[in-house]
Amino acid sequence: MVTLLRCRLLQHLDAALDRRLQGVEAFLRRETTEATAGQIPLELEEYASTQPEGHLIEVRDQKDRVILRSEPVPYPSRMRTREFSLYGHVYRARASASLELIEDSVQEIAYLLLGSLPVLIILIGITGYWISRRSLEPVDEMTRAARSISMNSLGERLSVPRSKDELSRLAEAWNEMLDRLEESFVRMRRFTADAAHEFRTPLTGLRTTAELALRRNREPEEYREALTQVITISDRMNHLSENLLALARGDDRAAPRSTGTVDLAGLIRGVVAEMEPLFLEKQLTVELALESRPILPAADADGIRRLIAALIDNARKYTPAGGGVRVSLHDDATEAVLEVSDTGYGIPDEALTRIFDRFYRIDPSRDRETGGHGLGLAIAQQIARFHHGQVEASNVPGSGATFRFRVPKNGAEH
């Protein structure tokens, strides 16, 4: 500011000196003629007497003789020069003015600025602190809100600022993360409650069977019958435990899995052959329509086998005696499609969106009679998603249901 002020004042002073020199020339042209050119020194003295003090005006002729010189100005000073021709003679005029007033003014301004600097620093500090506190207040509110959220208050969300800036995007990201955490926690709590409920029934059966057997002395055959019931209940609990472990491993995406080339048609034939006695027991017919042999270059063979078994076994359970199950397989350049259709009870429309939920049963009493826990389709869907595929359910017009497994042929590897 001091430097700019000095430059501006000097520019104004130079302009004033130039005007003064122009005034000398204009005065001589106005007050003299060629006939009276010899009176120029007298005219210049008269002109100089009318000028304010503190300014030097000097005029020299072409022989460098001084024809006018006013009182000198004190140092430091500023000087400007101008040449002009008059009546065949060349004159050089100089004008100067003292810089004392300018330097005093600039120095006064500098002292004023230096004196106000501490006040300015304090004001700037207070203003900066206020702005930073106001800017970071939403961050503090978000921090307090985040710390207040616990396991029992996962439904709470952070307030999103209206500024639509980085803070609002951060709050939205936090809320999206809380949505995912709440959903995972609710699913885990529901899964735990359902698992406890499923175990409660066979555990109660084990205890009741043992208590009845020990209540009085019995014949060996009665003890054998009781132990047979214990084995049956234990097998049911073991099967439930294996399914729960399969779901738990499926939730852990970091769990190691063996991948390799998988022949879907070969797996289907193997599963159907293993389950043939179960189909014969219910007098069910199985139709295979394996028009091609889709190959998955990188997939988990054990997982795919479990998925196929779950879909075929589900069709077997819900197809009445004398019915039939159809298993078809086809592929194209991008994906393989496995379809399992049955002539069973079909799926109510309201159940189509929940059929793959864990422990979900359309008819719980019938499922328990058939030994189901509502986990087979959930495991199948989990395996399908691990291979970037999907299992879909739909009703067959007339009767029965169809489960369709689609899997990318080049995207099976996770």
Image: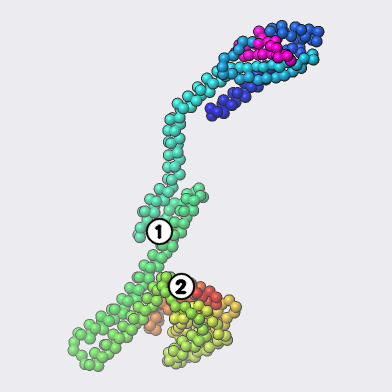
- Outermost residue on the front side: it is 63
Res. 95 in view: yes
Dot 1 crowding, Cα within 10 Å, few <14, some 14–19, many 20+? some
Residue 22: x percent and y percent? 71, 17
Instruction: For the N terminus, give its image quadrant.
Output: top right
Q: Which residue is mark 1?
A: 155
| Amino acid under disc 1 | Gly
Element class at badge 1? loop
Res. 389 in view: no
Element class at badge 2? loop
Along the horizontal axis of the image, is 19 left or right of 285? right
The magenta segment: 47-69
The answer to which of 308 and 122 lies nearer the viewer is 122
Residue 374: x percent and y percent? 41, 77
Q: Is residue 346 above or below residue 119?
A: below
Label 2 to label 1: alpha-carbon separation: 23 Å
Residue pictured at 52% horizontal, 85% vertical: 265
Q: Which residue is mark 2?
A: 354
Q: Earlier in the sequence, mark 2 or mark 1?
A: 1
Residue pictured at 40% horizontal, 48% vertical: 140
Residue 299: x percent and y percent? 49, 78
Asked whether residue 49 is drawn in magenta, I would say yes
